[in-house]
Every structure is written in C-alpha cells, then in structure tokens.
Amino acid sequence: MAPQIVDAPPTTIDLETGHESENKKNTGPDEISAIDEKKDDQIPAYQQDAFGNEEFAEVKYKVLKWWQCGLLMVAETVSLGVLSLPKAVAGLGLVPAIIILIGLGIMATYTGYVIGQFKWKYPHITNMADAGEVLMGRFGRELLGIGQMLFLVFIMASHILTFTVAMNTITNNGTCSIVFGVVGTIISFICSLPRTLEKMSWLSLVSFISILSAVMITMVAVGVQDDGAAVEATVKTNLFHGFTAVTNIVFAFSGHAAFFGLMAELKDPRDYPKALCLLQGIDISLYIIAAIVIYRYTGAEVASPALGSAGTLVSKIAYGIALPTIIIAGVINGHVAFKYVYIRLFRGTDRMHKRDLVAVGTWIGIGLVLWIIAWIIASAIPVFSNLLSLITALFASWFTYGLSGIFWLYMNKGLYFSSPRKIALTLLNVIIVGIGAILCGLGLYVSGKAIHDNPSSASFSCAASN
C-alpha cells in the first residue's frame, strides 16, 4: 500500500475568529505552493490530514455542510437523556438546577469552540487520540485514544440497554430481554454501515424529529393529568443525591468526545462555529423547557426517564416514537468509534478512500466487533447503569470541560499575561480545568458509592431491564 500524499490546508485560520489570516491572503500563489510543499515534507504521514486530497477519491469524507454537521451533533448529544433532567431538577430544586443547567450549557458552548480552535491550529486531528499526541506525545495518544473508545463503546451499550427497556415497556415484556438486546444491536450495526458522516446526516434529522416529538408528547401528557404536585425552589439534599443530579446534567452535554471527528469531515472547517451554535441553541433550550414543564406538573415524584410519569399508554406511545433517536444516537457515537479504529489502521494509505474488499470488509468487521462488545457489556455487567455513571464521570468531565481548558492553555503557552484579554481567558480556562477535575472527582465518588450500595443484579437475564 503506497503512502498517500496529502495537501496542507489551503489557508491559515486565525484561532480567535476562525477566518483566513491576512498574512496568507497577501502571499502570492508561488510562495503558498512552496510553503505547502515544505510543510508536506516536514510533517510525518501519521500527522497529516487523515483524509488528504480527495479530488479523485472513490470515498470522499470532507463534504459535510455546516447544518448537516450541526444536526449530527444534535443527534449524538440530545437523546432520551433529556427526559432524566426533570428528576435532576427534583433532586436539586428548581432554582439551583436551572442555574447549573444554564451555566454548564454556556460553558459547554465555550469549550466546544476551543475544540474548534485546536482543530484549526492542528488540522491533522480527527479524534481525541490525535489531540492527546499533540499534548503529550505517544503516551497522550494512547491515553486519550483508550479513553475515547471506552467512553463511546459504553455509550453504544447504553443505547442497546435503553432500546431493551423501551421494547419491554411497549410490549409489556413480550419476550426475553436478551432478544430485544440482540435486535437492537443488529439494527444499530446495519445503520452504522455507511463510511461517511454525510450519509449519516439524514438519520440525524430523523433522530431530532423523534426526540422532539417524544418530549412534546410527555410534556402534554403530564400537563393534562396535572397531579397538583408542589414545586420547590430549593430542596434539602446531601452530597451524594445532589451530585448524582448534577452528573445527569453533565451527561446531557457530553457530546464533545465526537466533535473532532465531526469537524474533520466538514467541507469548510471554518463553518464549525455555526454547527456548534445550532447544537447548543437546540439542546440548552430543549433541556430547560422540558425540565421546567415536566417538573412543574409532576413534582418531586417524577420518574427518570420522565416517560414513566406520563401514564402507561402514553409511555408506550412516547417510547415508540423515541425508538429512532434511541438507535441513531448510539449509531453516530458508534460511527465515530469505528472511524477512530479505521483511521488508526489505514492512515497515510490509499485504503482510506477505497471501496475494495479489504477496505469495505475491514469497516464492516470493525463495526461488527464493536457492536458485539457493546451488547456484551450491556447484557453481562450486573451494575451497568452505575458503571456507565462511573465512566461518564471519568471521561465526560474531561472531554466536555477539563481538556478544552488544557487545549487553550497549550495553544497560548507564553501568552498568558500578554494582554488583559489573555489574562481573563487564562483565568477562565484554569477555572474550567478545575471544574473538570471537580466533576470527575465527585462523579467518581457518587458512582462508586452507588455501585457499592447496589453490588449485584442478574447478568444475561430475560427479566425486564431497568
């Protein structure tokens, strides 16, 4: 397999604005060509843009429009977890919960933008492993690569488990839960087969319509049956129960692990901020509205997910409508995991863009293995839901918050005190790193305690999943 020669990015992008820099604009075509050739000579193959020059490629990756990227970000971030937020409000009280929800949402928007800045500065990055290599060399590459894969595979497993719960609810436990898990795994595997995100973007539109409809049905149902529940501005709680509610909010913004992979397939990387704004505008608005409305009509006794508070029939209808988003959100996270392995195997070779037996067979094989692993994890681990909370605390806290602060500090090394603006941003990013560490530490505590308090349940059981 001959090495693939790729072009350096045609423009230099200003990290603060996302636009082409003036120095590159004013450089003549001959100088630009010479600079780009020199860059290609200096950059090892594994550090070049993984997708390269796609002018004559059979499989073209870098074709995503900004709105397609934005919808993919919405689909992989916003899923049935939105209906766990009313329970978080009940656990914290209305006022603290809304403050935390808005605060973490705004911070997630900023940290998402920093991920974009890091990608602009290091265009070869397509996943967290590449970013880790920039920060800490080979050790960083393996550390963040393993972390991203663990996180994504556990997310895939959580969607298989959620599909099983939904089918048990819809069918009144019509058959063995293992059968529903296998069916969900097969459907997810089939939906994961396209190799480019552009082909997955249409699924994301279906996912968004699905979750929006399920949330609307739930809100209308709880509003109609209005139990006259009391709404509390604040509640008495303890560290364990209070921070368990906070981890649910953190998990609602935990899509950042996939952002490098999504941005890598944009036709124009400078459009990334528009995609990010589409995501954050939708998820913050939907989270706040759903959390407030459902909590208002159900109070402290709200179920998690809130579908359980909508009545038996409505719960079945809402779960049925939510099935597409349950599947598709897992599929998009799975796609990002497949792409990491595929790029790791074929980066710098012409297999990246081939449709031959080896390329297609490898892609299918990666997908099959990862979905089987996800199914085994969802079915075999007795305390899966609590273990998922532990994995989320360990990785989502850093991928969504802490690491972005580290990215910014790395990019601006030596400039921390160069201006009042830099001083303010330095302070902000140090605080973000600290928040990531606190979320990680306390999240590990509450999830570890939950595992300790609930030490066992059935593995590979036909009983209804919880």
Image: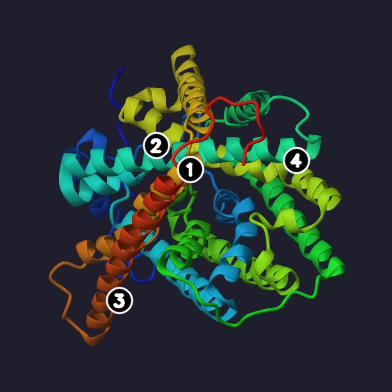
Q: CA distance from mark 4 to mark 1?
A: 41 Å
Q: CA distance from mark 3 to mark 2?
A: 34 Å
Judged from the image, the secondary structure of the residue bearing numbered disc 3 is helix
Q: Is residue 147 left or right of residue 140?
A: right
| 319 lies above or below 465 | below
Q: Which mark is residue 151?
A: none
Judge whether residue 34 can be spotted in this image: no
Residue 373: give x, y in percent of width and height. Answer: 47, 26
Q: Which residue sits furthest bottom?
A: 420
The kind of residue on which mark 4 rests is: Thr
Q: Nearer the viewer, mark 3 or mark 2?
A: 3
Q: CA distance from mark 2 to mark 4?
A: 43 Å
Residue highlighted by disc 2: 51
Judge whether residue 446 can be spotted in this image: yes
Q: Is residue 308 left or right of residue 409?
A: right
Depth order, front residue of 325/279:
325
Local packing at callout 1 (Cα closer than 10 Å; few below 14, some 14-19, many 20+) is many
Quarter where residue 98 is shown: bottom right
Residue highlighted by disc 4: 169
The reply to whether discs 3 and 2 touch (Cβ–Cβ < 8 Å) is: no
